[in-house]
Amino acid sequence: MTRTIAEINARIKSGKVVVVTAEELIDRVEEGGIRKAAREVDVVTTGTMGPMCSSGAYFNLGQGKPKMKLGGGKATLNDVPVYTGLAAGDFIIGAGALPETDPRNMIYPGRFPYGGGHVIEDLAAGKDLPFIAHAYGTDCYPRKELAVQVNIRDFNQAILFNPRNLYQNYNVAVNLSDRLIYTYMGILKPDLGNANYCSAGQLSPLLKDPFFRTLGIGTRVFLGGGVGYIAWWGTQHNTAVETDERGVPAAPAGTAALIGDLKQMSPKWLKGASFTGYGATLAVGVGVPIPILNEDVCRYAALKDRDLTTRVVDYSRDYPQGRSAVLARVSYEELKSGTIRVQKREVPTASLSSYPRAREIAEILKGWIAKGDFFLTERVAEFPGPGSGYTYRPLKERPIGGE
Amino acid sequence: MVSKRIVLHFPKDLVGEPVMSRLVLKYGLECNILKASITPRQVGIMVLGLKGRNKDYREAIEYLKSLQVTVQPLSQDVTRNADRCNHCGPASPSAPPTP
């Protein structure tokens, strides 16, 4: 049994497409087996919504009179600094950016109540925000100061860009020390007091296409409530990690870079988040369709929480020191049960990634495809996959001026 | 008997009053300080477990209020903003009280 994306799109157009969520595919496979499910189902939808600091947006603001060159100057959007090292009218904001007045961790633990991620959410919500810029002035762009209210409608372009998202799998974070610690994996209580994980497991896009057999550069996706695309593989993309017996990554592995029109998006699917003691970030809702091109694609898309595993890592000493000693291997089924067993202890678990939202995204994307509002794209290039040798490399520090 | 966890907000000028000693000596309550901090603006925040007789507990709370100490149940200190809630997990089980 094989089918092509062109055939699937023809079925979407004719209204005959069979599209199910990854959860529904699991049920179908359990009832009728892989072969039957692969024969019947054209597309499987996945979803995820977790905090991802490697999120940002770039903008172009039209020129007032006289004109102004932001490039090389300084600017803030709602007090949050933006990056202006580009052309006259362009700037970038990152989810982790903080107002100059934020005390950071000087008053420990910092609260980080507002940052770049919150700005992106506020723009998507249609709020007016103050934009203040200072420039050095040139003959062709003489203006040196600008202080105006801006709204997402005012920008010529407002583009969400994630250099990294859709982590294929992720660590479970615990704390082996004797003090409370504040991490990007949340607050971790001392002495294995809790365990936080961050993946949608059986709904997680890249875990359901673990060898990148269908998705790649150019894949159309649900992004922040609108339509976006996979722009590239993501930063820290890693194809050389521990795998389970099926070859599915059992540690943080592949990632994807995503791009889409922020003007189409909704604050429901772009949530600014504050991590006590760590910083500000953005939770981004993403859904990826997996075309069931053959039985093999179906087999992996049907993997269950019970089949998908990850590693438990200490974030008090091992992670900060660049060690990832595996304290335990656990399945997403165990994680979602509410407790896991680590070093003979029962440890309560919680997910940073929102499973209810992941489920909602998979349903919305399914609805778009079923109604003929969303067609699948052929990827234009593949991701580096397992066996490619493409890996994450830690920094090999070379002293400045050294040999 | 009553056993409760409460959050106290102390005004910044309340330094001369031996509040904890009074709760123990005058009202006979068992006190367990779960968390205490002073904000940059000198406001004191304490999460306190109190155990004792109903009458003593009520009188102690009145005493605290008479000092302009704000008293609220710990459960009230953890609030959920339904509009912004993203339905992730850690907020409820692992977040310590952060008044």
Image: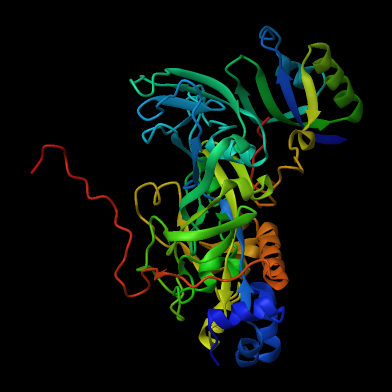
State the quadrant of the C terminus of chain A: top left
**Front-most of residues A329 and B24:** A329
In this rendering, would B27 be left or right of A129? right
Q: Is residue A346 visible?
A: no
Above-or-below relation of A319 to A36: above
- Image x and y of residue A107, in percent: 51, 25
Q: Residue at x 39, y 19 (%)?
A: A142
- Image x and y of residue A171, in percent: 48, 59
Q: Quadrant of residue A35?
A: bottom right
- Image x and y of residue A274, in percent: 58, 38
In this rendering, would A160 be left or right of A137? right
Q: Residue at x 67, y 73 (%)?
A: A23
**Front-most of residues A49 and A6:** A6
Q: Quadrant of residue A31?
A: bottom right
- Image x and y of residue B12, in percent: 66, 11
State the quadrant of the N terminus of chain A: bottom right
